[in-house]
Image: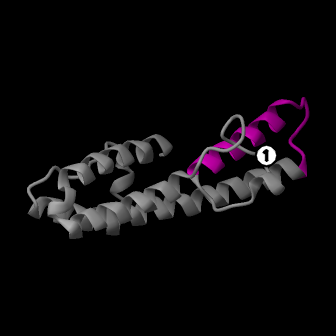
């Protein structure tokens, strides 16, 4: 999903350039979609673009980049032990799964509402539509 979001941002950037100043309403709609995609993607942080499973390093809004780091951290904790996962590791895993479910809903809502609406504007402007290969856009 993170790769899809990054690919869509590239498409939107190209479409914004093509729309240019001739269609201010379309340019504004594309900018709004890009802003939502950027929030969903999140910014890389730290040396690996991720954080721990809890604590001050996790402050900030939920994003796919942040979640990727959290998932990697949980995996490292679980794989580093020769015993069953601790209750803390299980709780961290549950938190990450809950965050993922929320992000998936945001992703689907973005497709269902925003991108479909922008695609209609693109169609009317005779510009290429925003497309995405994964089935995530078709709930």
Q: Nearer the viewer, residue 80 or 37?
A: 37
**For numbered disc 1, what is the local secondary structure?**
loop
Please tell me which residue is depicted at 47% across the width and 46% down the height of the picture: 1
Find out whether residue 71 is within the magenta segment.
yes
Location of residue 63 (image quadrant): bottom right
- Residue range corresponding to the magenta coloring: 64-87
On the image, which quarter does residue 99 sit in? bottom right
Q: Is residue 99 magenta?
A: no
Reply above or below: 5 against 34. above
> Which residue is at a point 52% across and 51% down the rendered structure image?
41
* x and y, in percent, of residue 119 in the image: 21, 60
Q: Position of residue 65 (x, y in %)?
A: 59, 47
Q: Is residue 67 toward the left or the right of residue 112 in the image?
A: right
Name the quadrant of the C terminus.
bottom left
Left or right of residue 131: residue 82: right
Which of the two residues, 108 or 14, is positioned nearer the viewer here?
14
Q: Position of residue 57 (x, y in %)?
A: 79, 52
SS assignment for the magenta stretch, majority? helix
The residue at the point 79 percent across, 34 percent down is: 76
């Amino acid at each position: 999903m993170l790769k899809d979001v990054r690919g869509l941002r590239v498409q939107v950037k190209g479409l914004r350039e093509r729309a240019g100043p001739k269609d201010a309403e379309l340019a504004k709609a594309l900018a709004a979609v890009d802003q939502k995609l950027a929030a969903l993607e999140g910014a890389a942080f730290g040396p690996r673009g991720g954080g721990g499973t809890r604590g001050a390093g996790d402050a900030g809004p939920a994003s796919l980049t942040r979640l990727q780091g959290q998932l990697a951290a949980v995996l490292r904790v679980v794989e580093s032990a020769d015993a069953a996962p601790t209750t803390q590791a299980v709780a961290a895993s549950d938190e990450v799964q809950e965050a993922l479910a929320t992000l998936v809903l945001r992703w689907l809502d973005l497709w269902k509402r925003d991108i479909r609406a922008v695609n209609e504007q693109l169609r009317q402007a005779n510009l290429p539509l925003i497309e995405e290969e994964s089935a995530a856009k078709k709930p």
